[in-house]
Image (cartoon, grey):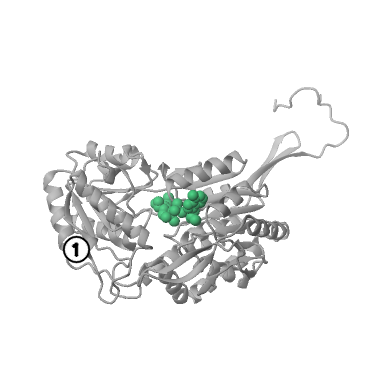
Amino acid sequence: MREITHFIDGASVAGTSGRYGDVFNPNTGEVQARVALATVGEVDAAVASALRAQQVWALVNPQRRARVMFEFKRLLEARMDELAELLSSEHGKVIADSKGDIQRGLEVIEFACGIPHLLKGEYTEGAGPGIDVYSMRQPLGVTAGITPFNFPGMIPMWMFGVAIAVGNSFILKPSEKDPTLPVRLAELMMEAGAPKGVLNVVHGDKVSVDALLDHPDVKAVSFVGSSDIAQYVYSRGTANGKRVQAMGGAKNHGVILPDADLDQAVKDIMGAAYGSAGERCMALPVVVPVGKKTADEVRERVLGELETLKVGISTDLAAQYGPVVSAAHKQKISDYIQMGKDEGAELVVDGRGFSLQGYEKGFFIGPTLFDQVKPDMRTYQEEIFGPVLQIVRAESFEEALALPSQHQYGNGVAIFTRNGRAAREFATRVNVGMVGINVPIPVPVAYHSFGGWKRSAFGDTNQHGMEGVKFYTKVKTITARWPEGLSEDSAFVIPTMR
Ligand code: NAD
């Protein structure tokens, strides 16, 4: 059986724990490889390597660091097909979607290519008599990232792209469900010219995560995954004095006002709800039509679209989405569908019986639609993370605004309308971190930053953009004077700018 090894100090390192995780082919349901789960000692080795590497890397001038990022970008583009196939083979998302996953990460690398400009500090000449004040952003040292299964390309690059460009080294602990692509990214970073140890990959579970959270030489941890683990990582990491940003789960709503272009809105919602089998933190699993007429029309149009929606294996170029990541996840989604039915929501389309000829053991689940979902139902309150769309009917704009605002999660939200004033009002008042106006998946571009509110994010700094640069650097402020002769100022009182 193929074994997926760690990548430490520029080399593949076989695991010694004797513990392994199964990596499936979600199309067939077969185990295709096993991934070594790290020991504390293996994490320590990765940190030691990263510490050595960072001391040298931090002295490389920013333009040279940017050149490594440029070359990495070039390599990603040249190998896009091969990387997307690799991603799909373990995750199950269709090839075009895997290319999108890698492309969104690549855009953060493009942002990181501008690091010489982004790292320029601030300068005040003549802040006092003969006194100049300036600030600089310095790297933190060894940094780490723990990533989820659903974006094995984009999310690691959100993190290490910025962390490494500013002069840190980085240890990636990717999801154990689809760990091969992250290793490939680390190999390509070495090929692009990053010194060994600047990017290490250790695979694992709670043991390796805890080891990173407790290690005194790890200065910052970025996490993306489910909310309970995000909160745990945030609490443990910050208790150990680290900087932590921890992004969690989501339940994004798409509000449709009666004046919206319904053809466009429903097409957008189909892709956002069912694309990647709903396994996106920015998916739109809840649609909130305002008024009965809008709701009935949305329901009819969704049903019409479902007639032609094609589910297939991840390499089927005509398929809109593929299997979910594991049998356990498929079971969890099926349990939620049953729960929704038991709670009294109307199960309009049930995807549980879906089966693909020749791939009967694959982790497929058909598109599912619920209507008459109520805010007190558990299936509304919790994240399902599958191809399940729930219609929650609202009577008014205020009711539609209150639903996402009062939900425990606050990652993304979208509003569909032709009314600019209503859209502006919604965007201003909604209690959610990322808002789309006639944009179903409002993932910000790389030079803005990504982050939700409430239980969708712990910590106060977002991913990538200037927020990412701030997270991975610390500010030093220097106040300087070059007096001629003896200064007459008293040294006994606090200096002020009189
Ligand atoms: P997960 O929380 O199960 O795993 C995330 C990471 O945490 C993995 O690397 C995993 O190995 C590790 N982990 C799991 N259990 C742990 C434990 N007990 N202690 C320490 N570490 C542990 O999440 P997932 O299933 O891989 O990903 C899906 C989740 O991620 C969804 O909730 C989704 O909404 C969320 N997500 C959020 C964002 C965002 O930006 N807000 C982006 C993508 C995914």
- Considering only vertical position in the picture, is 461 above or below 65? above
SS type, badge 1: helix
- Residue 444 in view of the camera: no
Foreground pick, 82 / 20: 20
Question: At 76% from the left edge and 37% from the top edge, which residue is drawn?
Answer: 130
Circle 1 is placed at which residue position?
306
Would you say 73 lies left or right of 391 here?
right
Q: Position of residue 191 (x, y in %)?
A: 61, 73
Q: Position of residue 479 (x, y in %)?
A: 73, 38
> Residue 162, located in which quarter of the rendered image?
bottom right
> Residue 361, located in which quarter of the rendered image?
bottom left
Would you say 420 lies left or right of 463 here?
left
Foreground pick, 100 / 112: 100
- Residue 474 in view of the camera: yes
Q: Position of residue 29 (x, y in %)?
A: 36, 69
Q: Is mark 1 within 8 Å of ligand 1?
A: no
Foreground pick, 77 / 9: 9
Which quarter of the image is occupied by the C terminus?
A: top right
What's the amino acid at mark 1? Leu
Residue found at the very far front of the displayed protein: 18
Looking at the rendered structure, the number of numbered marks drawn on it comes to: 1
Question: At 35% from the left edge and 62% from the top edge, which residue is drawn?
Answer: 327
Would you say 54 lies left or right of 100 here?
right
- Considering only vertical position in the picture, is 183 above or below 340? below
